[in-house]
Structures are given as C-alpha cells and as structure tokens.
Amino acid sequence: MVDPMPIFLFGLVGAAAYYGYRQLQQETARVIERNRRSEAEHRTGAHGTLERGADGVYRLRRD
C-alpha cells in the first residue's frame, strides 16, 4: 500500500509553488504598470497622476 504522506507533501509543495507563481505574476504586472505611468509622467513633466474619487474630487493616484 502507498503511504499517503509523501503524496500529500508533494501536493502541498505544488500548491505553494503555484500560489507563489501567481503572486509573482500579479506583482510583476503592478510594477510594470507603475513604471509605465512613471515614464509617461516623466515625459510630460507631470508631478503625479490625478484620479477622480467617488466624491468628485481629483487626488493623486496611490499605488
């Protein structure tokens, strides 16, 4: 009979690796978008990107 513990551990390691990979993809996308905005602000000479809030007031975008 096969011992279920190694199978469980391999599954757990695989799930953790998959979760880490997904987190890395999300973080990479966030950094790429921030760099793109920063380069656009540098080209235009802006000091930040404004976005309109729910109350209708424009504020600096926060990452």
Image: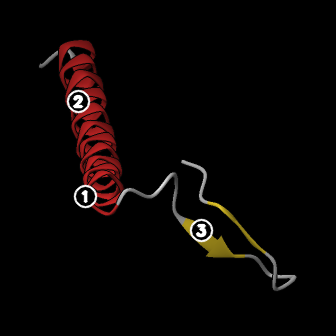
**Which residue type does callout 2 highlight?**
Gly
For marks 1 and 3 on the same chain, the one whose residue lies earlier in the sequence: 1
Identify the colour scheme used.
Answer: secondary structure
Label 2 CA crowd tier, 10 Å (few <14, some 14–19, many 20+):
few
Tell me the tag on residue 50. 3
Q: Residue beneath label 2, please?
A: 11
Q: What residue do we see at 23% from left, 45% from top?
A: 25
Q: Residue beneath label 1, please?
A: 43
Tell me the tag on residue 52. none
**Which residue type does callout 3 highlight?**
Leu
Label 1 CA crowd tier, 10 Å (few <14, some 14–19, many 20+):
few
Res 41 quadrant in image = bottom left
Res 15 quadrant in image = top left
- Contact between labelled residues 2 and 1, with CB atoms less than 8 Å apart: no
Give 16 or 46, whichever is nearer the viewer.
46
The answer to whether residue 6 is left or right of residue 44 is: left
The answer to whether residue 60 is left or right of residue 16 is: right
Q: Secondary structure at mark 3?
A: strand
Give 3 or 21, whichever is nearer the viewer.
21
In percent of width and height, residue 7 lies at 18, 23
